[in-house]
Image (cartoon, rainbow, N blue to C red):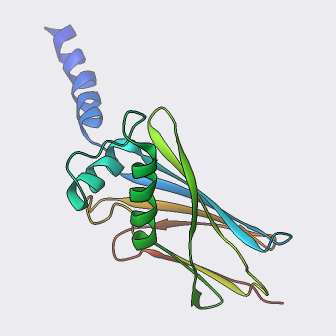
Amino acid sequence: MKKLSILLLVALPLMAAAAHKYYFSVTQADYDAQEHSLKMVTRVFYDDLEKAFQERYDASIKVDATYDQDKLDAYIQRYFDQKLIISINGKPQQLNYIGHKDEVDYVVCFIEVTGIQDLRSIAIENTLLMDVFPDQKNVIHLNAKGKKKSFLLTEGNDKAMLNFSE
């Protein structure tokens, strides 16, 4: 009986932790002064992205290698254009979606903003997956002009801002 009690004390919290899913994405954004561009890499769990696409666009979408990759890229670009807003010096910027690659548990998306002259501020609004998962957290690691800063964005607090003084 004592062994069963110990087993339950250890197993129940572990089972509860395994049943709870965390929703988050990570975006690394690096300013390249020589190329005048902001290069971003975003990692999103493939099943979360798939659920968002199925709810928003088409229930038959699969976020994996079996799905038409050109169609998938079009959906990713469309979604990111709506959910990831970049402003440079207070002006919204056009995202250049470069593509994606599949990893074991997540999709890695490559995005760039080009033509950045005289960088004074970067603002990033990231609401990826927040409409599907209210507990979604989006981490932004921003590296520009010698400054490094990380932000934890949540629903209602979905904007990161970094100002540079000359």
Left or right of 18, for residue 107:
right
What x and y, as percent, mark residue 83? 41, 70
73 or 89, which is in the foreground?
Answer: 73
Left or right of 86, for residue 22:
left
Q: Is residue 166 shown above or below 146?
A: below
Number of labels in the image equals 0
Q: Is residue 101 visible?
A: yes
Q: Is residue 164 shown above or below 79?
A: below
Query: Which residue lies at the image location 21% right of the left edge and 9% below the top edge?
Result: 3
What x and y, as percent, mark residue 10? 28, 23
Q: Is residue 105 shown above or below 78?
A: above
What x and y, as percent, mark residue 1? 13, 8
134 or 34, which is in the foreground?
Answer: 34
Q: Is residue 12 shown above or below 73?
A: above
Q: Is residue 126 visible?
A: no
Task: Return the residue found at the far left.
Answer: 1
Left or right of 126, for residue 143:
right
Left or right of 43, for residue 57:
left
What x and y, as percent, mark residue 56? 24, 61
